[in-house]
Amino acid sequence: MSESVNDFLHRFELERAGVRGVLVRLSRSWQQVRARADYPPALAGLLGRTLAASALLTGNIKFDGALSIQIKHAGPIDLLFAECGSDGRVRGLARWHGDIADEFRLDAAQPAPLLAITIDNRGSGQRYQGLVPVEDARLAAAFEGYFERSEQLPTRVVLAGDAQGSAGIMLQRLPGEGSNDTEAWHRVGHLLASVNDGELLGLAPETLLYRLFHEENVRLHDGKPLRFGCSCSRERVAAMLHCIGRAEAEAAVREDGFAEVTCEFCNTPYRFDRVDLEHVFHAAESAPAASTRH
Ligand SMILES: [Zn+2]
């Protein structure tokens, strides 16, 4: 899979310190996400780092589904969404209004923007959502806060992103054995803080981790490839049309007889003619009622 060589997730352990970690890098997949819109550079950087974070957060959880991160109420950013599936697919998008200056700071918005982290577990049908405010110019601090609040798990995150790639490292202090070693936790935290964007975005995983943590007995696990991919489907678009209602769906039918819905993540067009729409609404009406109508 040569195209995935620079799009990967590696788990690792720092055995001496009793710390586990995840390293993520996105290059081709990030470029595919970024190419969907003419993002202002500051917004592109934020989207890239959020996308890397969504992959980082999947590193230490067992699930079958997708983990998404949404940033809400962030001034000129109307929506910022990034998602990583348990199958290694990533996708993301942002919407904004007006200008976004290069020196835009997420924490400058009042009230503080909210970071919503959602884990959709298809296997069990369970959905979990955690919310954390963004109160620091460093986006990574919001993820650290998320783990400290939701799991009481000391966590350090660094993120980097430019037009070509995005990347991140997450360290977590293992519960139980060795967890009393506060000094070791501070030591690896300082080592992590010394990493620069160029190293994070460019060095091979072995080289990067050795450079940062060579005295910590790094154990690097096999990498998992990541790639751009969308989970949209005709069925999901039909369900969305059903949600917006018959009148609005029919109003969207153009002169050529088709209503067209384009997926914002992957630009796949889905076309529905009047007969298709009839099926969408008729099928739903004749299906057994899922809820009682009053
Ligand atoms: Zn799509």
Image (cartoon, helix red, strand yellow):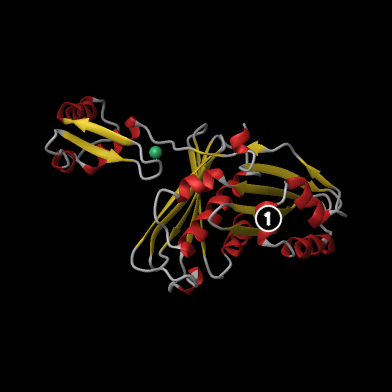
Question: Which residue is rendered at x = 52% and y = 66% of the image?
Answer: 134
Q: Residue at x 73, y 47 (%)?
A: 205
Label 1 residue SS: helix
Cβ of mark 1 under 8 A from ligand 1: no
Is residue 155 visible from the viewing direction of this image?
no
Left or right: 73 as drawn, with respect to 145: left
Q: For the C terminus, which image quadrant?
A: top left
Percent across and percent down for residue 32 are: 48, 45
Q: Is residue 199 left or right of residue 181?
A: left
Quadrant position of residue 222:
top right
Residue under label 1, please give it: 200
The image quarter in which residue 194 lies? bottom right
> Mark 1 Cα within 10 Å, few/some/many (few <14, many 20+)?
many
Task: Give coordinates of residue 5: x percent, y percent.
Answer: 64, 39
What is the three-letter code of the residue carrying label 1?
Answer: Leu
Q: Is residue 203 above or below residue 139?
A: above
Question: Is residue 116 shown to the viewer in this render?
Answer: yes
How far across and how far down the image is residue 86, in percent? 56, 37
Side of 7 where 210 appears, left or right: right
Identity of the residue drawn at 67% across and 59% down: 198
Quadrant in which ligand 1 is drawn: top left
Q: Is residue 104 above or below residue 123?
A: below
Task: Name the spot of residue 53 as percent of width and height, x first.
Answer: 58, 52
Q: Nearer the viewer, residue 264 or 116?
A: 264
**How many numbered tags mark residues here?**
1
Q: Quadrant of the N terminus?
A: top right
Q: Nearer the viewer, residue 139 or 185?
A: 139
Taking depth in this image into account, of 72 and 160 the one nearest to the observer is: 160
